[in-house]
Image (cartoon, rainbow, N blue to C red):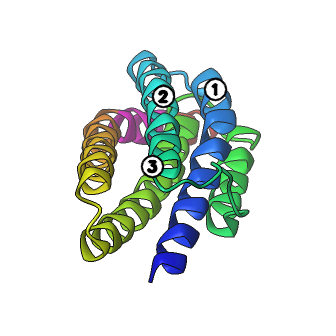
Amino acid sequence: MKDLYLNELRDIYNAETQLVKALPKMAQAATFPKLREGFEEHLRQTQNHVQRLEQIFASLGEKAKGETCQGMKGLVKEGDEMVSGDFEGAIKDAGIIGAAQRVEHYEIAAYGTARELAQLLGHSEHVTLLEQTLEEEKETDKKLTTLAMDVNRQALSASQQARAAHA
């Protein structure tokens, strides 16, 4: 079980380091100011998530290193495709939010699993750190959902206006 726990931590560590590189691109591509600010805030949080994981690795006497997280690699690729795609304005923002929420749901699942393994193995200090990150990921997902309500309405309006202009 310890090996499984370390494997989970390495996977999450790599996922978070991939996000540290991806979030600035998403922030730059966002046109809705609150969305851009949200990505910038989540970048700061993600950097803290990496530090917490490094703290956990250190307490285990392990080197902080990641195994390539193929799941996150695919999610980041999808996000990159949305950022560089043909959509514009609120429609692009709506797509970026969808990509970001898929990332958040992946992280919520990963941190939930790691927290439960830490609990099982008696690493109460790790449980606290992992729970803190898990709650931040859930809060980010809620913020994205709230932003999506506004952005999706704007995207629908823009789409209807474009369709009417071409009619």
Q: Which residue is mark 3?
A: 59
Taking depth in this image into account, of 72 and 94 the one nearest to the observer is: 72
Q: Earlier in the sequence, mark 2 or mark 3?
A: 2
Kind of element beneath mark 1: helix
Query: What distance separates the C-alpha of mark 2 from that of mark 1?
Result: 7 Å
Residue depicted at 57% across the width and 25% down the height = 27
Q: Residue at x 38, y 60 (%)?
A: 111
Between 8 and 76, the residue placed more toward the observer is: 8
Q: Calculate the distance from the C-alpha at mark 2 to the C-alpha at mark 3.
A: 30 Å
CB under 8 Å between discs 1 and 3: no
The prevailing secondary structure element of the residues shown in magenta is: helix
Question: Where are the magenta residues, as a range?
Answer: 151-160
Labels 2 and 3 touching (C-beta < 8 A) = no
Amino acid type shown at disc 3? Ser
Rounded to the nearest angstrom, the CA distance separating label 1 from label 3 is 30 Å
The residue indicated by pointer 2 is: 39
Locate residue 160, reporting x and y percent: 46, 41
Residue topped by disc 1: 24
Type of residue at label 2?
A: Phe
Tell me if residue 118 can be seen.
Answer: yes
Q: How many marks?
A: 3
Question: Would residue 159 be visible to someone looking at this image?
Answer: no
Task: Give the amino acid at mark 1.
Answer: Pro
- Horizontal side, residue 66 vs residue 100: left or right: right
Q: Earlier in the sequence, mark 2 or mark 1?
A: 1
